[in-house]
Image (cartoon, coloured by chain):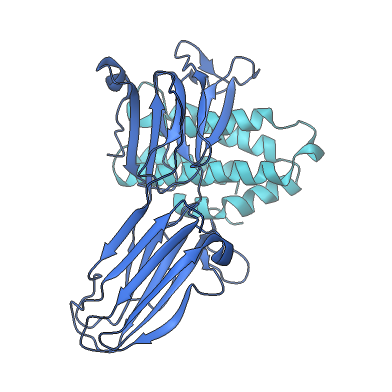
Amino acid sequence: MPAAANLRAAASQSYDDLVKQWTADTLRDALLAFATAVQATFPEDVANNRPVGAWLTIILAKATNMSTTVTDITASDVASSSFDVYRICWLADYFNAQGLITVGQAAALLAAYNANIA
Amino acid sequence: MSYPQPNADTALIKGWKFFRLNTPLVSPGDIYESAQGAHAFALGPESDISRVAITYFDNANNPTFIDQLKISPDRSFIGRIDAHNETTYQPANRPGRVLIAPDNLYNPLFNPFDDADEVTVVPPFLDVIQYFTPPQSLVTPRIDKEFYYQQFRKDLGVSIVSAMFPYFGRKSGSYSILNASAHAATVRLCGVNFLRANNAGTGFSYGYLIDPDILPATVLASGDQANGVLKESTHGMFDYIALRMEYSQNAANDDTPFKLIVSDKEL
């Protein structure tokens, strides 16, 4: 898929993009790289960062728990992890629209998506 | 309510025996947290969301220390869960806490009828109760929920309106539409399943209508009504119910009372 133009677009293409990563045997690495890239952008000491941080926590943990043997990663792993990516993108889009996170934080999340998943 | 979210600490400090998270979803990605441990989790009576994921700290689950359970109207969870604020989830290195998120797919971008001039989407409510003391028992079906509208938003010049109502996990329902306007109206009622994508296969965008319709397009003359029931065994289970109403004249403020009652009980 082409780069997502915004976070809603990223949410809606996340399944297709992660299937692409799965077939390239890079699903686990892509998820870890995506979430790691924006970890520092959402520090815990700001309360409004925590919901996005909560999704990053879940995405990182699930990716870490995925098998490092790429052939053991299943369609259920793709469905589950892409649902998490769908939701973090939607949440960040809402938080950005409401001014609960900064435009820069939303842009960083989108950039991390496009660099590592799209 | 939504964000900033209510704080479970306050409920505990005030001596309450539970923390209730009762909020309409503001996005498909809502997630909430509790820094307190619990003795049980259950869906609250007002929840439209039927499946909720509880993420919690689990010492035994090395190396991430994360585990997850799901609750539904048929399955609450009784058992002690500690929040473990003093430790961190890995590899995110974020403090232990209980995370609560809907596990139903919701996509507010779905427009069920492309020709509708006005679309009303009723957002789903998330209602979860976290118990601070062990409950004696937990039987947690949701209340029968009633959606009633005497009129839908319909500006002058608009002839087609649609509305969407949450149905996640419901097993039965009842609908009633009365055409109390002075002219004919065509009504149609459908089940909806959401999709995440705007390009899923051949042009399906964010969702699709369940075939066959619950109520196929039916012309109601002035004073006529359409009534019916929904059954899991007949209609299946789906995410939302979509209503389409087409008025034969473009008058504003047409009275077409619509009542939908949804239930967790099997008929």
Tell me: B251 left or right of B120: left
Query: Residue B6 placed where, x, y %?
Result: 29, 30
Q: Which of these two is toward me, A115 or B127?
A: B127
Q: Quadrant of the N terminus of chain A?
A: bottom right
Q: What residue appears at the point 43 percent right and 23 percent down from the top-left corner?
A: B135
According to the rendering, which colour does chain A have? cyan
**In this view, B124 is above or below B165:** above
Q: Quadrant of residue A98?
A: top left
**In this view, A30 is above or below B164:** above
Query: Residue B218 placed where, x, y %?
Result: 41, 84
Q: Which of these two is toward me, B178 or B196?
A: B178
**In this view, B168 is above or below A55:** below
Question: Looking at the image, can residue B126 be seen?
Answer: yes
Q: What residue appears at the point 33 percent right and 38 percent down from the top-left corner?
A: B22
Query: Residue A2 placed where, x, y %?
Result: 58, 56
According to the rendering, which colour does chain B have? blue
Tell me: B114 left or right of A59: left
Question: Looking at the image, can residue A5 be seen?
Answer: no
